[in-house]
């Protein structure tokens, strides 16, 4: 994101028990997809509970620039009039994707099968992230790219009209790559097939069906998911309710587990099994997390989470859980730093190409705050304090967030269980996914 104004350093201090019942904002992944699909349906869709954050705003701006009408009716409620699959307009200017990998990769897919030329730009963090993973399949479908040798932003894409269907086996476990191909397939005649050896978040598949698209999902002999879509497909408008984001809830779940005396309920949290592995890991560490009032909202499972302070123990995390908690590792590392015994993670190379290198940055940040962390090529090994407070950051020192919202929020939570407090150098990146974070944290702290 283009950071407005001066840096916003903040000190997060040792906290009393966390209590109450809170709602976290709408799911970021689902919000992006809701805007994209509603913008392609002919007619009016209403989205309730949309995440109003910088990343989602970047997606909305790109869809407006290609013809959709997108208006806020009241906070959290948006009305979208779509243009129809195949009818996207050439944007007049470059599309600024800010900090958002999801906006960039999914929109590249969506535009790749429309005969328009688009220029994608992003902030310093996004401009370091690999785009080759989507360029490769989209080029096979006929899109043309002008891009530097590293396959990073800025880049120019000329969409293919007509695009050709592909049969593609994912090389990385990435919902963004899968979704890019499925969105391109919407305006591609013929049968596009994506084979996913490791299941990743399935919001695109669920929501495509909600908007009336026809796709089949089979399991191959080797256990891979095979997603087939026969294009082109028209989308029908749809009213969508966006559940609370489990990746945002994660900061409050870990905070309540770590801060002695806490008993906190986080209501309306998305429980899609392709996103929920953190809860299983924390329970295996000894965390008390109860799920209440299971229901389905907008085609997605949802529950309220009651979380009570618990004594956590370190564990070895099964790499098979990685995809279903990929964004939750920074805050899991904080939980591990306070557990008793050793936590071992592996198979996490993907964390090095997120908004920051999350293995290197979390290792440095936690070490700086007094934790015992060893960094490996594909994971961290953490020796927990056994519940004792972290030292915190020294006067005059602060944690470098590296333009990464999840580092900033994770280290803020670390501050709540530190002797001296933790200073985070800049809280502005939090606007990417969770603008209400600091306010909600204030609400649950007993004064
Ligand atoms: O599809 C999505 O909405 C996302 C997929 C994940 O990225 P990858 O597909 O790169 O794993 C995740 O890290 C990101 O925050 C959101
Ligand atoms: C990786 C993330 O998002 P994106 O890829 O959309 O930038 C995230 O939110 O942690």
Image (cartoon, rainbow, N blue to C red):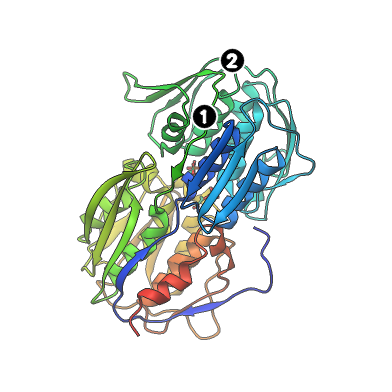
Residue located at (66% from left, 39% from top) = 68
Q: Foreground residue, 324 or 186?
A: 186
Viewer-nearest residue: 403 or 3: 3
Q: Which mark is residue 189?
A: 2
**133 relative position to 442: left or right:** right
Q: Which residue is mark 1?
A: 236
Task: Say whether disc 2 or disc 1 marks the residue closer to the N-terminus.
Answer: 2
Residue 422 drawn above or below residue 189: below
Kindly state the secondary structure of the residue where label 1 is placed.
Answer: loop
- Give the position of the N terminus as an image quadrant: bottom right
Crowd tier of the residue under label 1, counting other residues whose Cα lies within 10 Å: few below 14, some 14–19, many 20 or above? many
Residue at the right extreme? 92
**Marks 2/1: CA–CA distance:** 18 Å
Please say whether residue 377 is visible from this viewpoint: yes
Quadrant of residue 403 in the image? bottom right
**Left or right of residue 127: residue 193:** left
Residue 434, x across and y down, in percent: 49, 61
- Mark 2 nearby-residue class (10 Å; few <14, some 14–19, many ≥20): some
Residue 299 place in picture, x, y as percent: 37, 38
In which quadrant will I find the C terminus?
Answer: bottom left
**In this rendering, is residue 275 above or below 11?**
above
Q: 87 or 350, which is in the foreground?
A: 87
Query: Which is closer to the viewer, label 2 or label 1?
Result: 1
Give the secondary structure at mark 2.
loop
Q: Identify which residue is drawn at 48% across, 83% down.
A: 394
* Residue 343 position in % (x across, y down): 30, 58
Q: Which mark is residue 92?
A: none
């Amino acid at each position: 994101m283009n950071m407005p104004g001066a840096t916003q350093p903040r000190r997060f201090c040792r906290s009393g028990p966390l209590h109450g019942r809170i709602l976290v904002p709408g799911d970021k992944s689902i919000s992006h997809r809701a805007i994209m699909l509603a913008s392609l349906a002919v007619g009016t869709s209403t989205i309730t509970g949309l995440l109003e954050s910088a990343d989602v705003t970047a997606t909305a701006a790109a869809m407006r620039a290609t013809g959709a009408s997108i208006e806020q009716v009241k906070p959290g409620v948006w009305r979208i009039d779509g243009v129809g699959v195949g009818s996207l307009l050439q944007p007049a200017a470059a599309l600024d994707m800010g900090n958002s990998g999801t906006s960039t990769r999914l929109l590249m897919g969506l535009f790749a099968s429309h005969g328009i030329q688009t220029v994608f730009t992003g902030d310093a963090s996004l401009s370091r992230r690999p785009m080759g993973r989507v360029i490769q399949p989209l080029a096979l479908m006929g899109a043309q790219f002008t891009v530097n040798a590293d396959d990073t932003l800025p880049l120019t894409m000329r969409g293919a009209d007509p695009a050709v269907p592909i049969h593609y086996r994912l090389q990385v476990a990435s919902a963004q790559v899968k979704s890019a191909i499925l969105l391109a397939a919407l305006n591609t005649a013929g049968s596009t097939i994506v084979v996913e050896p490791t299941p990743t978040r399935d919001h695109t598949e669920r929501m495509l069906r909600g908007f009336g698209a026809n796709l089949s999902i089979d399991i191959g002999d080797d256990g891979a998911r095979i997603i087939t879509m026969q294009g082109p497909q028209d989308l029908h408008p749809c009213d969508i309710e966006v559940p609370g984001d489990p990746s945002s809830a994660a900061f409050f779940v870990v905070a309540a587990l770590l801060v002695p005396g806490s008993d906190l309920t986080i209501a309306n949290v998305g429980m899609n099994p392709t996103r929920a592995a953190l809860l299983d890991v924390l329970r295996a560490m000894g965390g008390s997390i109860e799920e209440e009032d299971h229901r389905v909202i907008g085609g997605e499972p949802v529950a309220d989470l009651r979380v009570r302070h618990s004594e956590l123990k370190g564990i070895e995390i099964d790499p098979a859980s990685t995809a279903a908690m990929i964004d939750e590792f920074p805050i899991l590392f904080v939980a591990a730093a306070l557990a008793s015994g050793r936590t071992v993670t592996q198979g996490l190379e993907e964390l090095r190409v997120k908004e920051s290198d999350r293995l290197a940055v979390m290792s440095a940040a936690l070490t700086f705050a007094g934790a015992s962390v060893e960094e490996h090529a594909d994971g961290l090994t953490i020796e927990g304090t056994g519940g004792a407070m972290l030292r915190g950051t020294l006067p005059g020192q602060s944690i470098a967030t590296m333009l990464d919202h999840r580092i900033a929020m994770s280290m803020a939570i670390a501050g709540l269980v530190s002797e001296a407090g933790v200073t985070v150098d800049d809280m502005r990146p939090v606007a990417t996914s969770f603008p209400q974070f600091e306010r909600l944290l204030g609400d649950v702290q007993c004064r």
